Amino acid sequence: MQEHHPETPGKISDAPMNGREIEARIAEAKEALGSRVLILCHHYQPDIIARFADHMGDSLHLSRLAASRKEARYIVFCGVYFMAETADILSAPEQEVYMPDPGAGCPMADMARLDQVERCWRELTERVGETILPITYVNSSAEIKQFCGRHKGVVCTSGNAAKVMDWAFEQAPRVLFLPDQNLGRNTALAKGIPKEEIALWDRRKAELQGDPDRARVILWDGFCPVHVRFTPEQVIGLRTQHPGIRIIVHPECTETVVRLADGSGSTEYLIREVREAESGSVFAVGTELRLVKRLASTLPDRTVYPLDEEHSICIDMSRSTPERLLVVLEGLLQGQAPGRIQVSAETAEWSRVALERMLAIS
Ligand code: 13P
Ligand code: SF4
């Protein structure tokens, strides 16, 4: 696993504080920091954190904000590690990025280590030469993004993966798609690329499953442990229980779940679909539970069911707690906050190239 998980910051005080006290102190610290702080919050964050966000968004939206809001000296990123790294890479050099808990990682991002990717690349290029270009989903470490930047490649998010893949095919006849096999496969299949032209790199055996000469898309074998829990049976079961229901899912779900659903797309797509539907519409949404519940509570004239109520919480997203947020904000006021995320200048240089290629395409 990646060595990115630093210690969780300590407690604010030994005296127990109740939830209301903590929230009041967060609000006070935020007000005292004023425009010096920008709190960015991913849609999967708990409500208790979301209420302090200056902006909520999916990873593409939050990346754009980090790149454009140069006035805030401090960016506090409530999400997971790769998102805060991305914010650090895209923000101005004088801006500082913090997380309530830098120990919040993404298991999918940890499934692609630089040494593994370099080995795969060596073996593939020995076989197919310069005919291949790497794309990494933003859910990856800064090291993997820098690898893509150096090799003429690019980053994508679930919101722009199709466009980015089109761009990649204008540069080269083949792509290596990292680290999410499901997003890569679902994007390729939606473009009409036949299954025989999609191969899979087994990272543990360090070998390709499929025909390297025929393959146009080579998938890394990573996956999101939350989104692969959704099953075809759940989709079929909900359709039987609620005839007329519209089932929409995130493209990190498996190919079968995506095929059985009525639509699939990024977090912003899922929100837009429900928001723009007629009053009275009935949905099931296959993604992280907190986003689905927030959709249901903020749009009460639609019925929104989670595709799976039991297994769809991202544990790492739960690591931002009000207490940890308070430690960072009060630390910033005192000039010594924990939880700073700093990507080394060398890694940042090439990962920025890959990220900026993406921002120019989408
Ligand atoms: P988005 O790119 O849609 O924000 O998704 C990020 C993520 O971690 C999904 O699991
Ligand atoms: Fe990573 Fe999945 Fe959590 Fe998203 S939901 S942060 S992909 S583990």
Image (spheres, rainbow, N blue to C red):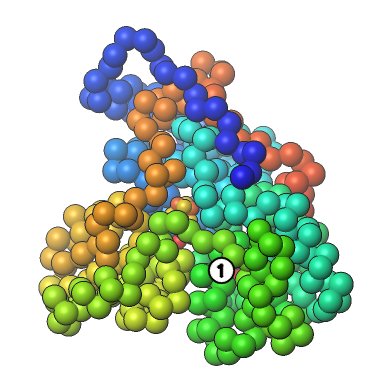
Which x, y percent locates residue 253?
Answer: 42, 68
196 vs 36, nearest the viewer: 196
Can you say which quadrant of the picture contains the N terminus?
A: top right
Look at the image and tell me whether residue 67 can be seen: no
Q: Residues within 10 Å of mark 1 (few under 14, many from 20)?
A: many
Residue at the spot 75% in from the left edge and 46% down from the top edge: 347
Q: Quadrant of residue 116?
A: bottom right
User: In the rendered view, would you say 359 is above or below 325?
Assistant: below
Can you say which quadrant of the picture contains the C terminus?
A: bottom right
Tell me which amino acid carries mark 1: Gln
Residue at the spot 52% in from the left edge and 50% down from the top edge: 107
User: In the rendered view, would you say 36 is above or below 299?
Assistant: above
Q: Residue furthest front?
A: 205
Q: How many marks?
A: 1
27 vs 153, nearest the viewer: 153
Q: Quadrant of residue 240?
A: bottom left
Residue at the spot 50% in from the left edge and 28% down from the top edge: 8
In screen coordinates, is 116 left or right of 57?
A: right
Which x, y percent locates residue 299?
Answer: 19, 61
* Mark 1 sits near ligand 2, with its Cβ under 8 Å away: no
Residue at the spot 27% in from the left edge and 61% down from the top edge: 308
Which x, y percent locates residue 65?
Answer: 52, 51
Residue designated by label 1: 181
Dot 1: what SS?
Answer: helix
Which x, y percent locates residue 186?
Answer: 50, 77
Look at the image and tell me whether residue 299 can be seen: yes
In screen coordinates, is 113 left or right of 127?
A: left
In screen coordinates, is 275 left or right of 264?
A: left
343 vs 197, nearest the viewer: 197
